[in-house]
Amino acid sequence: MQHETTRKQAKLRLSGWAARVKRRSVRCVDGFLKTLNLHQEEISNYVPERYNSGFVEGLNNRIKVIKCRCYGLLNRDHLFQRRYLDLFGYALCGRRNNGLALTPLGSMA
């Protein structure tokens, strides 16, 4: 679905694909097909505009990982220092980050 597609076209294509998979009796995707059927409206809403919340989900995941790494820190300031270093450490040290680290607000990266 790389070209411009409407929601209706997307629903038809998804339904057609699901029907072909069901006819072939591929049982390992039954759970996926159930989820696809349950959320078909939301999935088809993505197609015309191609907006998603990937950046926010990634940032939330980073924060959760940092919280796990900081478990047991008794000083709240140390938690925020760790968070800042994990998010902006590459930029602060002048090292290349391959696009994985965020840049601090106000920096020209």
Image (tube, helix red, strand yellow):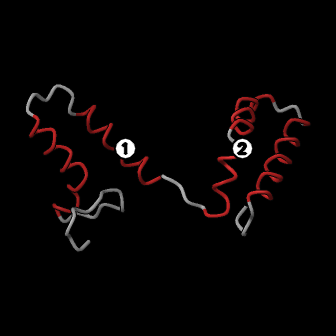
Q: Are marks 1 and 2 in contact (CB under 8 Å)?
A: no
| Residue drawn where x is 30% and y is 57% of the image | 101
Q: Position of residue 6 (x, y in %)?
A: 75, 63
| Residue drawn where x is 36% and y is 62% of the image | 99
Q: Position of residue 18 (x, y in %)?
A: 82, 42
Q: Nearer the viewer, mark 1 or mark 2?
A: 2
| Residue drawn where x is 15% and y is 38% of the image | 79
Reading the image, the residue beneath label 1 is 60
Any mark on residue 40, and which? 2
Give the answer, above or below, for where 31 lies relative to 57: above
Regarding mark 2 in the picture, which secondary structure is present there? helix
Give the answer, above or below, for where 21 lies relative to 109: above
In the rendered image, the residue lying farthest to the right is 23
Q: Earlier in the sequence, mark 1 or mark 2?
A: 2
Q: Is residue 63 rendered to the left or right of residue 34?
A: left
Q: Position of residue 71 (x, y in %)?
A: 21, 28
Q: Quadrant of residue 83?
A: top left
**Label 2 neighbourhood size at 10 Å, few (<14), some (14-19), many (20+)?**
some
Amino acid type of the residue that numbered disc 2 sits on in the rendered structure:
Gln
Between 49 and 28, which is closer to the camera in this rendering?
49
Q: Is residue 84 rendered to the left or right of residue 59?
A: left
